[in-house]
Image (cartoon, grey):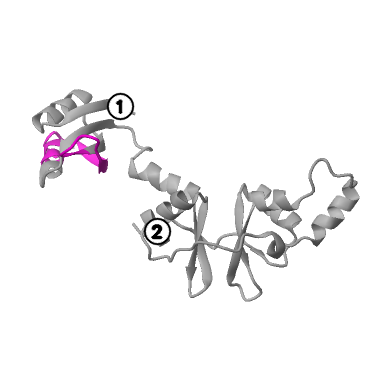
């Protein structure tokens, strides 16, 4: 899956000249924690976060009254307070690269840029949505987690047995295993019972970790 399949298109943004008070209102309105910052040519120049705004705002210990604070904040623009170093991806990049960038750099989003123009944004929410879909979380069925031998054809044989039992695999995810020579597999299937799933796993020489109807 690539970025353009999961990104939020036409993201809400602010400009360098936008007061941080307006940026804060946009964040509250849309429940965002950060916004891309564009220049007058609509090119990405930075990103502003709730943390950036908090750092720029007077502390609770200030002796200024609220009118003075409001005046000072109205003069502060996103261009002055934004984070200038922004990691980006292209819309044809793979999704896991965006996830890697976000994890490795401890950031909550990555703007999607094509020819210096922001065409979208990938956020934690987008990745959570993808995660939910990959595991078939919105469908009721039998969910099994197990260790399977890391050999060619093992997964195909398992899926064939599920099909023979009239079950329908709607999600299947594998990942590295702590047990040498195996992969850890999570499967969600409909139209099959727990007992039938257990029987298939036993026939497939898989080591069951957990199975349940959800």
Q: Earlier in the sequence, mark 2 or mark 1?
A: 2
Would you identify the image quadrant in which residue 178 lies? top left
- Residue corresponding to mark 1: 213
Q: Is residue 143 above or below residue 121?
A: above
Q: Which residue is drawn at 68% across and 67% down?
A: 16
Q: Image quadrant for the N terminus?
A: bottom left
Find residue 167 and name its label. Answer: none
The quarter in which the C terminus is drawn is top left
Viewed as shown, does residue 55 lie left or right of 6? right
Q: Which of 207 and 190 is in front in this view?
A: 207
Q: Mark 2 = which residue?
A: 5
Q: Quadrant of residue 71?
A: bottom right
Q: Is mark 1 on a helix, strand or loop?
A: strand
The local crowd at label 2, few if under 14, some if 14 to 19, many if 20 or more residues have their Cα within 10 Å, is few
Residue 89 in magenta?
A: no
Residue drawn at (24%, 27%) of the image: 209
Q: Where is residue 6 in the image (x, y as percent from the top left)?
A: 42, 55
Whether the magenta-drawn stretch holds residue 163 is answered as yes
Q: Is mark 2 on a helix, strand or loop?
A: helix
Q: Which of 115 and 144 is in front in this view?
A: 115
- The range drawn in magenta is 157-183
Tell me if 137 is positioned left or right of 112 in this view: left
The mark tally for this picture is 2
Badge 1: how crowded within 10 Å, few (<14), some, or many (20+)? some
Q: How far apart are marks 2 and 1 (CA)?
A: 30 Å
- What residue is rendered at 71% in x and 48% in y? 54
Q: Which residue is drawn at 41% across and 62% down?
A: 4
């Amino acid at each position: 899956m690539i970025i353009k399949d999961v990104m939020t298109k036409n993201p809400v943004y602010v400009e360098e000249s936008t007061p941080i008070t307006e940026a804060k209102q946009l964040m509250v309105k849309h429940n965002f924690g950060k916004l891309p910052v564009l220049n007058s040519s609509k090119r990405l120049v930075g990103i502003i976060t709730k943390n950036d705004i908090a750092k720029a705002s007077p502390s609770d210990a200030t002796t200024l009254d609220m009118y003075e604070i409001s005046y000072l904040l109205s003069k502060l623009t996103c261009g002055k307070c934004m984070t200038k170093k922004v990691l980006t991806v292209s819309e044809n990049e793979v999704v896991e690269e965006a996830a890697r960038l976000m994890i490795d750099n401890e950031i909550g989003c990555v703007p999607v840029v094509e020819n210096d123009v922001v065409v979208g944004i990938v956020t934690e929410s987008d990745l959570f949505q993808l995660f939910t879909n990959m595991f078939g979380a919105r469908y009721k069925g039998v969910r099994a987690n197990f260790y399977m031998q890391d050999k060619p054809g093992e997964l195909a044989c398992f899926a064939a047995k599920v099909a023979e039992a009239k079950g329908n695999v709607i999600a299947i995810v594998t990942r590295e295993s702590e047990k040498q020579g195996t992969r850890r597999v999570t499967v969600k299937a409909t139209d099959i019972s727990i007992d039938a799933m257990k029987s298939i796993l036993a026939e497939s020489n898989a080591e069951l970790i957990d199975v349940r109807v959800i």
